[in-house]
């Protein structure tokens, strides 16, 4: 049987990279006595996979980890046991059971992610933010109204021009920050910092002189059988739902 863990990452833990997060959850599983399954062979390891690894410096309210279990455990009990031993700056939000087929894994079905980008008063602190300029609200509409947004995207071997406009589903300037709804996952993945840099240039700003903090709100999957849950997906008819909503609570 398989389960999906939704967790938050905040505070100083935003500086911890993906590999360290993975190692920490391995310790959490042992300390919380979660009946997680192991691979076979001479070097067994815990069966776990993250839906969409988070970049260093980014906080989140919606991170996902899929695991395989050897026996059932109550959803509430599992979440409580993990939160008792997890490090400060991380918190398990939910523990749900998901179908066992590989096509339902978080890595496979992730299609989009929602972010909020806050403007900082100083690059020294992510806790002190300032309001978004009023002119940016109109600029966001014009930015999204472009037919194409071509950028130079670096790969391991070279650079190439890429049109990122098809992968920007929404961008809106609110008083508290810039909200972005972007393509994510194995097929199409658009980094929020790249989009923010292009938007700042479009708004007449120098990205190097505008300190920002990126926060991921949630990760979404495309599932035609489940109706969209949020207003934005209802309006667009995308059929996107949170990864959490695809699971069920037990016990």
Image (cartoon, rainbow, N blue to C red):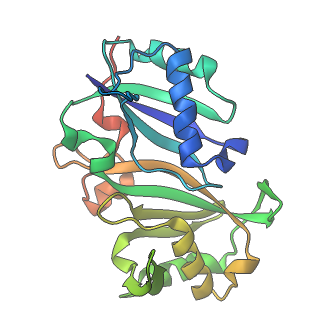
Residue closest to the far front: 42
* Figure quadrant of residue 56: bottom right
The image shows residue 9, relative to residue 76, as above or below, that is: below
Q: Residue at x 22, y 48 (%)?
A: 223
Q: In the depicted view, which residue is nearer to us: 4 or 67?
A: 67
* Figure quadrant of residue 5: top left
Left or right: residue 177 versus residue 145 is right
* Figure quadrant of residue 132: bottom right
State the quadrant of the C terminus: top left
Q: In the depicted view, which residue is nearer to us: 50 or 74?
A: 50
Counting labels gives 0
Q: In the depicted view, which residue is nearer to us: 133 or 106?
A: 106
Left or right: residue 216 versus residue 45 is right
Q: Residue at x 40, y 88 (%)?
A: 161
Looking at the image, can residue 200 be seen? yes
Q: Position of residue 243 (x, y in %)?
A: 35, 41
The image shows residue 149, relative to residue 56, as above or below, that is: below
Left or right: residue 39 versus residue 212 is left
State the quadrant of the N terminus: top left
Q: Residue at x 42, y 64 (%)?
A: 182
The image shows residue 24, relative to residue 75, as above or below, that is: below
Q: Residue at x 52, y 58 (%)?
A: 115
Q: Position of residue 35 (x, y in %)?
A: 39, 15
Q: Position of residue 51 (x, y in %)?
A: 39, 46
Q: In the depicted view, which residue is nearer to us: 148 or 232?
A: 148
Q: Position of residue 248 (x, y in %)?
A: 30, 25
Looking at the image, can residue 149 be seen? no
């Amino acid at each position: 049987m398989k389960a999906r863990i939704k967790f938050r990452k905040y505070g100083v833990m935003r500086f911890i990279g993906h590999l360290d997060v993975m190692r920490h959850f391995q310790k959490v599983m042992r300390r919380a006595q979660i009946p997680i399954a192991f691979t076979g062979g001479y070097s067994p390891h815990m069966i776990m996979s993250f839906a969409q690894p988070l970049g260093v410096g980014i906080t989140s309210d919606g991170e996902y980890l899929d695991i395989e279990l050897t026996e059932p455990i109550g959803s509430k009990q599992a979440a409580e046991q993990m939160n008792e031993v997890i490090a400060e700056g991380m918190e398990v939000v939910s523990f749900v059971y998901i179908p066992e087929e590989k096509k339902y894994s978080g890595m496979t079905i992730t299609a989009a992610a929602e972010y909020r980008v806050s403007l900082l008063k100083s690059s020294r602190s992510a806790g002190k933010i300032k309001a978004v300029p009023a002119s940016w609200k109109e600029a966001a509409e014009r930015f999204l109204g472009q037919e194409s947004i071509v950028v130079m995207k670096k790969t391991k071997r070279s650079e190439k021009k890429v049109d990122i406009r098809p992968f920007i589903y929404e961008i809106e300037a609110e008083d508290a920050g810039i909200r972005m709804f972007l393509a994510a996952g194995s097929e199409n993945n658009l980094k929020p910092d790249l989009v923010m840099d292009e938007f700042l240039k479009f708004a007449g700003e120098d990205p190097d002189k505008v300190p920002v903090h990126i926060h991921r709100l949630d990760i979404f999957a495309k599932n035609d059988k489940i109706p969209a849950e949020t207003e934005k997906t209802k309006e667009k008819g995308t059929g996107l739902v949170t990864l959490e909503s695809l699971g069920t609570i037990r016990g």
